[in-house]
Amino acid sequence: MIWLHYVQIKKLPGNEDIKLPQKMSELAAGFDVVAALEEEVVLKPGQRTLIPTGLAMAMPAGLEAQIRPRSGLAFKHGITCLNTPGTIDADYRGEVKVLLINLGQEPFTIVRGERIAQIVFQTVPAIELTEVAELSETVRGEGGFGHTGK
Ligand SMILES: O=c1ccn([C@H]2C[C@H](O)[C@@H](COP(=O)(O)OP(=O)(O)OP(=O)(O)O)O2)c(=O)[nH]1
Ligand SMILES: [Mg+2]
């Protein structure tokens, strides 16, 4: 059985024309989100900018939404999300924004309605942190950061 999670989404004033995040294929993991820019933005190489989506969301406790880059934009133009994956908390009611950076060599123009990123919803386990004096022993121990070889 597939358990459906109901996420509420609201178009912010002045964004009635903005498409709701959309899956581009039946089993896509991500809902593509579009830029809700009033005027086009030209992102120079190395530059970053916060792009509005014109949307706010309310999801049930135990979910998060991740803002992830689109691989096509990354591959063709070097456009990615600087803080990938961006985290949208279940209790955030502000506008969802996408922090894009141009890691390519050419300026990149972003226009209203263009698909700039994708939202992937995830369940977040309920965690309670417990402070202890000693941790359990493991074979790995403190080895990390490549200690198993290249
Ligand atoms: O790509 C992103 C990342 C975050 N947010 C919003 C939703 C999220 O719930 C809130 C806070 O994000 P985060 O916790 O990553 O940032 P912070 O620097 O820790 O800010 P805060 O102190 O507000 O938690 O900002 C976005 O709209 N887009
Ligand atoms: Mg935070």
Image: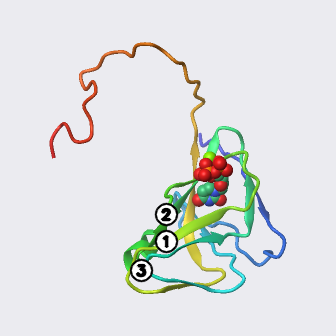
Toward which corner of the image does residue 30 lie, by quadrant?
Answer: bottom right
Q: Locate residue 15 relative to residue 89 in the image: left or right.
A: right
Toward which corner of the image does residue 36 lie, by quadrant?
Answer: bottom right
Q: Residues within 10 Å of mark 1 (few under 14, many from 20)?
A: many
Q: Locate residue 63 relative to residue 148 in the image: left or right.
A: right
Q: Inspect the image, locate mark 3, and give the three-letter code of the amino acid beneath it.
A: His
Q: Inspect the image, locate mark 1, and give the three-letter code of the amino acid beneath it.
A: Ile
Numbered tag placed on residue 101 in the rendering: 1
Q: Residues within 10 Å of mark 2 (few under 14, many from 20)?
A: some
For the N terminus, which image quadrant? top right
Q: At 24% from the left edge and 31% from the top edge, which residue is drawn?
A: 143
Q: Nearer the viewer, residue 99 or 76?
A: 99
Residue under label 2: 82
Q: Of marks 1 and 3, which one's residue comes earlier in the chain?
A: 3
Label 1 with label 2: CB-CB less than 8 Å: yes
Closer to the eye: label 2 or 3: 2
Dot 3: element: helix
x, y percentage for residue 25?
53, 66
Dot 2: element: loop
Residue under label 3: 77
